[in-house]
Image (spheres, rainbow, N blue to C red):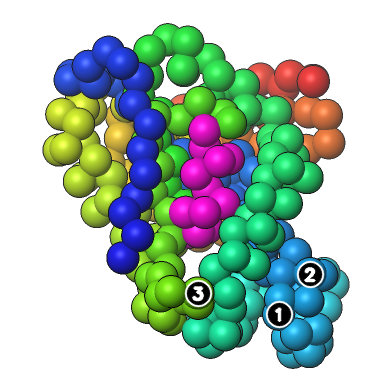
Amino acid sequence: MRKVTTVENPQSSKGKRFAVFDIDGTLFRSGLYREVFFELIRMGALPEKLHQQLADKETAWQKRAHGRAFGEFEQSMAEIFDEQLPNLKISDFEQAAERVINQHKDNVYVYTRNLVKSLGKQGFFLIAISGSQTEVLEPFAQHYGFDYWVGQQYERGTKYFTGHIRKTHKGKDKFLSEIIHEKNLSLTDSIAVGDSGGDIDMLSMVEQPIAFNPENNLYQTAIRNSWKIVIERKNMIYELEKGTDEYTLSQANSH
């Protein structure tokens, strides 16, 4: 299994405050893994028919046919990708990941981009935990100054992947617990930002959870637990905070 590569600040991380971010849909406006999949098809490294297999679910998502449409589209893509791994050249995958970073690395949300930058300047230990593959997550995380990252890992053979996968889109709280223990980080003033139900356990661990553009499951959890909710739409950022009886729009910033 390919070891997760990390980059750390030269100063000790002992007792440091930390902030942990989901990436896809939270910092990156799309999905890094999704962009790699489509890039591999454009390159001819994966057959075009794979895209056609997704057509119905992609259309249902684009038409917002029902509340589960995007999740079903993502799940189908992941299953197809996983099935194709033993037929995928490592060199092609690395080339696709490099192209995605070169073309799309700046396609990010303003709120979370600025938050990452601000917290980094304040000395927070910055962590990215993502369901996207390490090969595309690593250069993205480096570009935005993260100190540590965890991404999906594909076991490598000589020229092709073996098909064995270390999944990271769920159980993010367990990965975070390991990082906190390994780096001896402090939960005091800790921050977590995520956009989906898969981030709930991770957000539950910290003192300052932020539900960013949350899907319904996360939104309902944030409401029940009085977490901050932030919405970025067009050139406006809305922060919702718990009042006496209900959530209210506490701040609206343009960018």
Decide: is 215 above or below 84: above
**Residue 209 can be seen, yes or no:** no
Tag of residue 159 = 3
Q: Which residues are magenta?
A: 131-142
Judge left or right: residue 251 versus residue 235. left
Q: Earlier in the sequence, mark 2 or mark 3?
A: 2
Cβ–Cβ below 8 Å for labels 2 and 1? Answer: yes
Label 2's element?
Answer: helix
**Residue 93 can be seen, yes or no:** yes
Percent of width and height locating residue 204 = 32, 44
Q: How far apart are the two marked residues, 2 and 3, measured between alpha carbons?
A: 17 Å
Callout 1 environment at 10 Å: few (<14), some (14 to 19), or many (20+)? many
Judge left or right: residue 169 versus residue 214. left
Label 1's element?
Answer: loop
Q: Residue at x 22, y 16 (%)?
A: 12
Q: Of discs 3 and 1, which sits in the foreground?
A: 3
Q: Magenta span has 123?
A: no
Give 196 or 249, whichever is nearer the viewer: 196
Tag of residue 46 = 1
The kind of residue tagged 3 is Lys
Label 3's element?
Answer: loop
Decide: is 181 above or below 33: above
